[in-house]
Amino acid sequence: MLKENFRHNLRVLRHEKEWSQEYIAQQLGISTIGYYKIEAGKTIPNLDRLEQLANVLEVEIGTLLGLGDRILPISYNEH
């Protein structure tokens, strides 16, 4: 469940800022494929990468993970 909350929140936060996967990858200093794998749940980021993601997205790690807060609502069309 935590993994699904994280993936969902990561995607929602990125869409709310209207940022591409390429843009976030650049901010993190990783490849677009590397970022895609994180958002798709194919790679589990370590704590340092989670902190980087939270900083880039300007949220707390707990918000990104869906801990202590509700899961972020979907504000875009997922189809």
Image (cartoon, rainbow, N blue to C red):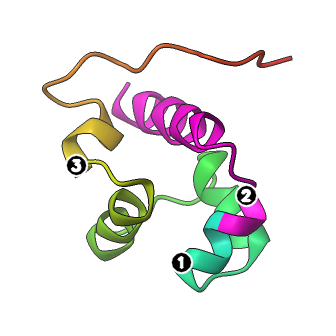
Q: Which mark is residue 21?
A: 2
Q: Earlier in the sequence, mark 2 or mark 3?
A: 2
Task: Give the side of residue 78 with respect to residue 12, left or right.
Answer: right
Task: Give the side of residue 7 with respect to residue 30, left or right.
Answer: left
| Total tally of numbered discs in the picture | 3
Label 2, secondary structure: give it.
Answer: helix
* Distance (Cα) linking label 1 and label 2: 11 Å
Q: Which mark is residue 60?
A: 3
Task: Give the side of residue 43 with respect to residue 22, left or right.
Answer: left
* Distance (Cα) linking label 2 and label 3: 20 Å
Three-letter amino acid code at the position of disc 2:
Gln
Three-letter amino acid code at the position of disc 1:
Leu
* Distance (Cα) linking label 1 and label 3: 16 Å
Examine the image and state in which quarter residue 12 appears: top right
Q: Earlier in the sequence, mark 1 or mark 3?
A: 1
Three-letter amino acid code at the position of disc 3:
Glu
Q: Name the residue carrying label 1.
A: 28
Q: Residue at x 63, y 53 (%)?
A: 42
Q: Position of residue 14 (x, y in %)?
A: 59, 44
First to last magenta residue range: 1-23
